[in-house]
Amino acid sequence: MASSSLKKGKRTTATKPGVAANTLSAKLARLDLRDDWDFALHLPIRYEDETRLTRIADAQAGVPCQLEAEIVHNEITYRPRRQLVVQAKDGADTIYLRFLNFYGSQVKQLAPGKRVRLFGEVRPGFFGAEMVHPRYHMVSEGEPVPEALTPVYSTTAGLSQVQLRRLIDRSLAQLENKHQLDDALPAAVRKKVALADFTPSMLTLHRPPPDASLTSLAERTHPAWRRIKFDELLAQQLAMKKARAARDAKTAPKLITKNKLTDTFNKSLPFKLTGAQLRAWNEIAIDLAAPHPMQRLLQGDVGSGKTVVAALAAAQAIDNGYQAALMAPTEILAEQHYRKLSALLVPLGVAVTWLTGSLKAKEKRAAIEDIAAGTTQLAIGTHALFQESVTFAKLGLAIIDEQHRFGVGQRLALREKGKTGNNTAEPHQLMMSATPIPRTLSMSYFADLDVSVIDEMPPGRTTIVTKLVSESRRDEIVARVRSACEQGAQVYWVCPLIEESETLQLKTAVETLDSLTEALPGLNVGLVHGRMKTAEKQEVMARFLANDIQLLVATTVIEVGVDVANATLMVIEHAERMGLAQLHQLRGRVGRGAKQSTCVLLYQNPLGETARARLKVIFETTDGFEIARQDLLIRGPGEHLGARQSGAPLLRFADIERDVDLLEAARDAATWMLKHTPQNAETHLARWLGSRQHYLKT
Ligand code: ADP
Ligand code: MG
């Protein structure tokens, strides 16, 4: 969520010198609070029950409660460190309050004889019952307790709950006066989804009445919460649908089916396309022929054969006199695409250009010139493809492999490449990913993408056998590697992921190489890692492909896309440290040929709960879709969205898994509203996105 990442103070330090970073408006900006609607929709993160007073004697340790007491003494002590200790009494019982950070004004305020209302947890202390840093305010005798639950808002340093509450109250009042708090949903929608009315829902959440159920408020199952969550999901759906409409209004070159290069290419393949590949290809071909930019995700499990489908799409662009670009996230992968696709396409007369950052200056210049002159028909490379110095003469199609590895910015930059001179058309975009998007995500954050699924593996593949083996049995596994290699197979050995330090990771990889070379005399053992120079990497991979290396020790750089059919055994060390998607991708490096393949997951005990859950999933299923679904359940949607930073701000209140019924209802309502009550749709969007429009720019 935006506010939490901003809370780390980045904004403050980034402020120009001389500009007061800690003014009220700077603090509010940190919370994304600008206009009245921002305040109104800044809903409490929880509630506290201050409607009751507890006696000191009845307070239970660790349970938040409210006390009222009269101050009898206060003093600043210096041991063990400077602190303000206040002694207060409620009848015969005494409570000590300790403040480690305090202002001089607080010492005066908490003077003997004054009454104070305290909110916090009581715990046994050195002198007796104590509260450390309680929330408090001064009261006079007999002052009534509030009738409503007290809302607690997320806030930032230096902005108190009281201040924030006052600002929110002011915004709510202003909106109410201007009749802007009125319901923006047509009655038909409210009725169909059985939703509570808007204004009372808002007021209930900000100022819950005394009889409101604290549990249903806390768990966000209260009808008022349901209403707000629906509204939030609706705003997301409306925004997505509008973005979609905007895309459909843009122009793109019509790349129609000509059956020239596409046909020759298809016929030149050493295999027949699977039914699923054909289906996906048809969907793409139709999109390409349309006069507005395609944005389609080609999703298919690891090894399902996405690359040929992408190559067919490129061929269709070329058939129409346009260029195509294929971008991959790593050099290894880009190089492999280049090698495979040039082998298939160059004999058919296609000009293929290779461009990555590691090319020598002279080669790079030549590649860039060819791309700009239009001599290049298919450009393959890494993100170097969309650096500023690269201009395409006539880009018709941008293909992005392993799209989840790229940020939105990088993808947009490539799309912009299609706009040359006074040509405003955008290229079509085809993204590829082995990571399926769970249904709830494709209904929400990814609703603007069209998806083609390859749900069938090329024939002759055998399923991969997965074994979970404790690290203590490493010797057995090394013996197994030896016998596999002796039988002519090849093996990947994946080194542990060390997130904290790339250097340490490298060190471990080198040590693994040494120990395996020693343990397996007579075998050729190679090493590939992320810090190697491209040429070195390429050489190692070429030797592995030629079976000149039998055992390839690798860091997770081989996670995506590498394709060596003779490799039938993979050992993954410290599998418990890796995420599900990563394990699935890694495992997909084997099982690429007709021979039975095995993936051994070495793990180190003791296993944490999440690690155990992940290993269980990866052990039990090879179905990428099921794995992604489980991943979403274990981790929440954040990871899926990390690189994507979807076109809408992350949901603040709704949870797409828990609130899937509301999500479905919101999707239907968005379609209905745009058609029948577009004005309501606009009003609704303005409320929710108002000053957050900048999130939509992507
Ligand atoms: P991924 O979907 O993981 O990117 P690839 O496109 O790399 O998969 O394809 C995996 C392997 O399967 C490649 O060696 C490719 O040549 C082969 N392949 C693709 N389609 C077929 C098919 N219809 N029949 C047989 N082999 C195929
Ligand atoms: Mg691939």
Image (cartoon, helix red, strand yellow):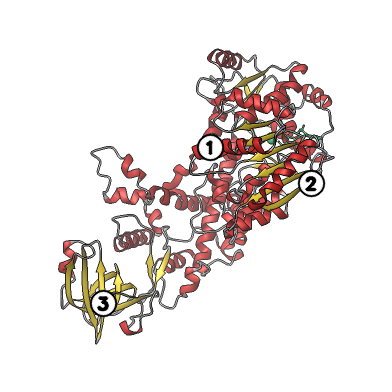
Q: Residue at x 40, y 60 (%)?
A: 179
Where in the figure is residue 323, as x and y percent of width and height?
Answer: 65, 21
Judged left or right of residue 41, residue 416 is right
Inspect this view and state whether residue 626 appears.
Answer: no
Q: Is mark 1 in CB contact (under 8 Å) with mark 2?
A: no
Marks counted in the figure total 3
Q: Which residue is mark 1?
A: 507
Q: Compare residues 584 and 298 and report the one nearer the observer.
A: 584
Task: Tell me where residue 59 appears, x and y as whole percent.
Answer: 35, 80
Q: Which of the two discs, 3 and 1, sits closer to the camera?
A: 1
Say which of 322 and 3 sits in front: 3
Q: Return the x and y of residue 131 as percentages of the image width and height.
A: 30, 72
- Please rate how many residues cluster around mark 2, counting C-alpha atoms within 10 Å: few if below 14, some from 14 to 19, many from 20: some
Image quadrant of ligand 1 equals top right
Packing grade of label 1 (10 A; few <14, some 14-19, many >=20) is few
How far is mark 1 from mark 2, CA to CA?
A: 34 Å
Q: Which residue is mark 2?
A: 463
**Residue 91 located left or right of residue 410:** left
Question: What amino acid is labelled 3 in the image?
Answer: Phe
Viewer-nearest of labels 1 and 2? 1
Q: Is mark 1 within 8 Å of ligand 2?
A: no
119 left or right of 341 in image: left
Residue 191 seen: yes
* Between discs 3 and 1, the one toward the N terminus: 3
Q: Amino acid at mark 2?
A: Thr
Question: Residue 644 at what x, y percent from top left?
Answer: 55, 42
